[in-house]
Image (spheres, grey):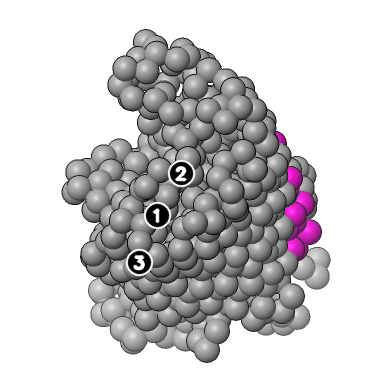
Amino acid sequence: MTKTQLTTQFTLSQVIGISFITVLIAFPAQAKNLENGQKQVQSVSVTHRVDETNETDEQTSFYIPVLENPTENSELVGQVTSVNQLSDVQPTDWAFQALQSLVERYGAIAGYPDGIYRGNRAITRYEFAAGLNAALDRINELIAAGLADAATGEDLETIQRLQEEFASELAVLRGRVDTLEAQTATVEANQFSTTTRLTGQAVFAANAGGFEGENLLSPTGEIFRQQDPNATFIYRVNLDLNTSFTETDLLRVRIDTGSGGPNDNAGGFLEPNFGSTLDFSAKPPSNGNFGLGRLYYTFSPLEHVAVSIGPNIRTTDYIDRNSYANLSFRDFSTLALTNNYVLFPVNGPSAGAAIDWNVGDGPFTIRALYAAADAGNPTVQGILRGTAPFTSLLYPGNTSATADRGDRGLFGDTHQGMVELEYAPSSTLALRVQYSGGRIFDQSFDAVGVNAEVAIAPWLALFGRYGYSQYRDTAFGEIEPNYWMAGIAFPDLLQEGNLAGLAIGQPFIATEIGNATQTNLEAFYRFAISDNIQITPVIQVVNDPANRSENGTVVTGTVRTTFSF
């Protein structure tokens, strides 16, 4: 056992005073035995911080000695009733002088931290016991270091006699230390308090764009747009209140707002059906209105299992994540490139639950969720929110306030269930397979998907998605839309924290809708000004928008600035 020896020595009364203070803030109890056949001296360890120079701290351990064969614990910690035990130890007493001699001969610790001499004074028997401990500790060090001859037989007999005369005090001190140890353990086990942290994000974006030709047609062939939109300056803000009650759970309350909604940008204004809008514009409440963006509680009932439940969740928060194409404020902004488009007919505010289970802390993770788009509505009427833009095309009229097609509520129409199996043997490779199914506007749907990503090198990654779905009894009959996207990413391009990406995809391949297939392309370069500020120029190109070959190409440009705090 190694301990730091303070070289400065003061009087015995100083030894005892500072040692007694140390005893009162004691931590774990320990035992120490003398070696080489010497008499056994048991000790209880406590720690005291000494600052002699006011510049550096030295940590010194003290030990409270106890008899080798103490009496029963009930007696050791019992009330002291002997008058002799309660009396002070005077500087003229034999015990005082004997201990002072040991201190001086063996260099035991002495003095107050400020080095001021306090004078010879009478001390209590408990203070004396603490001082005795310091001397015993020093002698134990000498014996442990192989210097057994340094302690004479006469000194050992003196120590034994002192131990016998102060056995009760030493035992009581040990009981106090044991009690403090238990109390400290209780405090450490319960020291976490309910904590709420505020985090947030603000996105500013300047956007402009236009299309080739005189007008744009809708997927059904009607004239939809006849002129280019004006340039806009748009925004999105979200504030998260993150509260933990047990340090392993999370209650999240998100308040968010935005500018004009999905149509405040050129992509969303010119092609609103198949995900060409900026994703960060489509999600929050618009026109400066504040709303509840998230409200859920996440906890871990078992190791490696996380369960989330709440009246306001988003399906895309839990399924189909990708390291390079998922968060519109961080990577791609085009809605159809951030998630598998045909897999999420329910992608807005919903009530439900999700589970994430990392099997055996290994490469496999299973995720599942259930979401109801209108869980708070017990009737069959009212505006249905929380569905993807393409659902309005497939089921026209069903999102209006007078729509009465299908039940509502938690288990009625519209709802969605999803399952995902992920295989990620390393941080550079992940493969995910998914199933999605449920009912939308009183009609069933099913969809399957694949999501993959691989980092070929620290500076190069490939990723992609594929989806196949069936939507029944739509305005176009029973259709089987397909989806795909693929991309390449360049992490840390030119500077650590930067990211460049290029992706192309076809969000809604369905021969029943239009006479062509829309193709979306996006390129961006995210430049990290700092850990909290990022500027990202974005270019979007939409060919055959709305699945119509008559439509000219749509081109938009955006400069996105993200502030995170």
- Assign the magenta stretch its main secondary structure: strand
Q: Amino acid at mark 3?
A: Gly
Relative to residue 204, is residue 460 drawn left or right? Answer: right
Residue farthest left in this picture: 288
Is 501 rendered above or below residue 25?
A: below
What residue is disc 3 on? 210
Relative to residue 38, is residue 96 drawn left or right? Answer: left
Give the percent coordinates (x, y) of residue 124. 35, 54
Q: State yes or no: discs 2 and 3 in contact (Cβ < 8 Å).
A: no
Check residue 100 for magenta coloring: no
Is 134 rendered above or below residue 303?
A: below
The image quadrant where one finds the N terminus is: bottom right
What residue is disc 1 on? 216
In space, the residues marked 2 and 3 are separated at their CA atoms by 19 Å
Q: Where does the magenta region start and end? A: 422-437
Lower sequence index among marks 2 and 3: 3
Residue depth check, mark 2 versus mark 3: number of the one nearer the observer: 2
Residue 507 seen anywhere in this rendered image of the structure: no
Would you call the spot at circle 3 few (<14 residues within 10 Å), some (14-19), or many (20 or more)?
Answer: many
Q: In the image, which disc is placed on residue 221?
A: 2
Is 371 rendered above or below residue 534?
A: above
Give the percent coordinates (x, y) of residue 457. 71, 79
Q: State yes or no: discs 2 and 1 in contact (Cβ < 8 Å).
A: no
Relative to residue 187, is residue 461 drawn left or right? Answer: right
